[in-house]
Image (cartoon, helix red, strand yellow):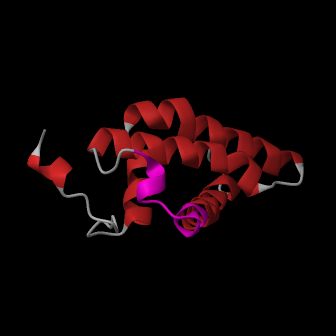
């Protein structure tokens, strides 16, 4: 048994902006980007270009859930994403990605 396992803080918080750090991870980890992020953005771009109604929550939330899980696993931040990510964090990640990537989609990215 490790000493760190004896004392688990009841309020697991990280000393940095978890939302921004998770977004940076999802965009910069080659495997996650290739397997999850890029396909989600490409699908979003295709829907936007075709004029279909885009529901960001339906299309981005599954990718964000995988990103939170992958982030926790890679950096050993928590045993599960539910320990550190709140619903507000997930919504903030989704809104930030959607707003930033929509600008890129409008400029012709993700073809």
Q: Quadrant of residue 106?
A: bottom right
Region rendered in magenta: 80-91
Q: Which residue is more in the foreground, 8 or 97? A: 8
Residue 6: x and y in percent read 17, 52
Vertical placement of residue 74 versus 88, above or below: above
Dividing the image into 4 quarters, which one contains the N terminus? top left
Residue 97: x and y in percent read 57, 59
Residue 50: x and y in percent read 87, 45
Residue at the image point whose x is 36% and y is 44% from the top: 79
Residue at the image point whose x is 56% and y is 60% from the top: 90
Vertical placement of residue 16 versus 58, above or below: below
Residue 11: x and y in percent read 34, 69
Q: Which residue is more in the foreground, 35 or 73? A: 73
Report the side of 100 relative to 48 (left or right): left
Dividing the image into 4 quarters, which one contains the C terminus? top right
Q: Which residue is more in the foreground, 63 or 6? A: 6
Q: Main secondary structure of the magenta part?
A: helix
The residue furthest left is: 3
Residue at the image point whose x is 56% and y is 68% from the top: 92
Residue 89 is inside the magenta segment: yes
């Amino acid at each position: 048994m490790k000493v760190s396992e004896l004392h688990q803080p009841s309020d697991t918080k990280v000393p940095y902006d978890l939302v921004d750090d998770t977004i940076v991870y999802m965009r910069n980890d080659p495997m996650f980007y290739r397997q999850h992020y890029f396909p989600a953005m490409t699908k979003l771009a295709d829907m936007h270009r075709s004029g279909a109604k885009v529901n960001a929550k339906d299309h981005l939330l599954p990718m964000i859930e995988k990103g939170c899980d992958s982030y926790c696993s890679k950096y050993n931040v928590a045993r599960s994403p539910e320990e550190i990510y709140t619903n507000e964090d997930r919504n903030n990640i989704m809104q930030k990605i959607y707003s930033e990537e929509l600008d890129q989609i409008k400029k012709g990215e993700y073809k």
